[in-house]
Image: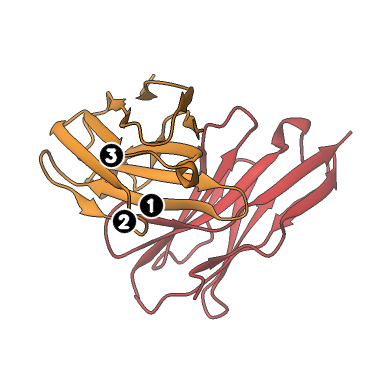
Amino acid sequence: DVKVTQSSRYLVKRTGEKVFLECVQDMDHENMFWYRQDPGLGLRLIYFSYDVKMKEKGDIPEGYSVSREKKERFSLILESASTNQTSMYLCASSSHDRGRGEKLFFGSGTQLSVL
Amino acid sequence: AQKITQTQPGMFVQEKEAVTLDCTYDTSDPSYGLFWYKQPSSGEMIFLIYQGSYDQQNATEGRYSLNFQKARKSANLVISASQLGDSAMYFCAMREGAPGKLIFGQGTELSVKP
């Protein structure tokens, strides 16, 4: 089974802490994405990457950074967590190859609570 | 301006009946893709169906079909013969330009009644 794995299903952190959310995919996909999901707002794109060492800002990058040192791993970093970053975080990956389909494969999500 | 609009926050349908979930989109790019995803209470996002802007025929995947009306900029999802397991949140999404970069609607919560 192909998989996108997020390291934690639930996470509780304190305001001001540095938070790392890890995501690993085993499909050899070039593209990886971080979204956050909030009720009534759907999913919003935070950052994405089309290649190792490469990153692009999405629609809501403020307060976040990312790291992609290896093709299979894409990390989301909250430098100083704040309560308004309490949310569900979803990682996804996809292939460049249109022949393999354009669809995103998602992880199960990390519900982050910042107290 | 909203790029993807789902106007139905919640819907109910009787088991075995068909249901249509609405989605309208806004883009000036001639090349785009439209997706529907299902999110059950477990939280995972499950791909259902895809329609490319140049596809001549409406996409179908088993009980799911996408009613693509390009001139009206709508991409409604039709689920035939609803099952209890169809109860979930459904998201419409659009890929515009950049590969794999999707814009999502707000979602529609579907409840299937026995």
**Numbered disc 2: what chain?**
A
Q: Is residue B101 above or below residue B23?
A: above
Q: Nearer the viewer, residue A42 or B100?
A: A42
Q: Position of residue A20 (x, y in %)?
A: 31, 29
Same subunit: marks 3 and 2: yes
Question: Could you tell me which quadrant the N terminus of chain A lies in?
Answer: top left
Q: Quadrant of residue A31?
A: top left
Q: Nearer the viewer, residue A20 or A71?
A: A20
| Earlier-in-chain disc, 3 versus 2 | 2
Q: Quadrant of residue A15?
A: top left
Chain displayed in orange:
A
Judged from the image, the secondary structure of the residue bearing numbered disc 2 is loop
Q: Are marks 3 and 2 in contact (CB under 8 Å)?
A: no
Residue at image position (50%, 40%) is A86
- Residue type at tag 1: Leu
Q: Are marks 1 and 2 in contact (CB under 8 Å)?
A: yes
Same subunit: marks 1 and 3: yes
Q: Colour of chain B?
A: red
Q: Position of residue A2 (x, y in %)?
A: 36, 23
- Report crowding for label 2: few under 14, some 14 to 19, many 20 or more residues within 10 A (C-alpha): some
Question: Residue under circle 3?
Answer: A79
Question: Residue under circle 2?
Answer: A58
Task: Specify whether residue B81 is in view.
Answer: no
On the rendered structure, is B99 left or right of A87? left
Q: Position of residue A85 (x, y in %)?
A: 45, 43
- Look at discs 3 and 2 and give the one toward the viewer: 3
Q: Nearer the viewer, residue A74 or B16?
A: A74
Residue at image position (36%, 36%) is A16
Q: CA distance from mark 1 to mark 2?
A: 5 Å
**Numbered disc 1: what chain?**
A
Q: Position of residue B105 (x, y in %)?
A: 55, 58
- Residue type at tag 3: Glu
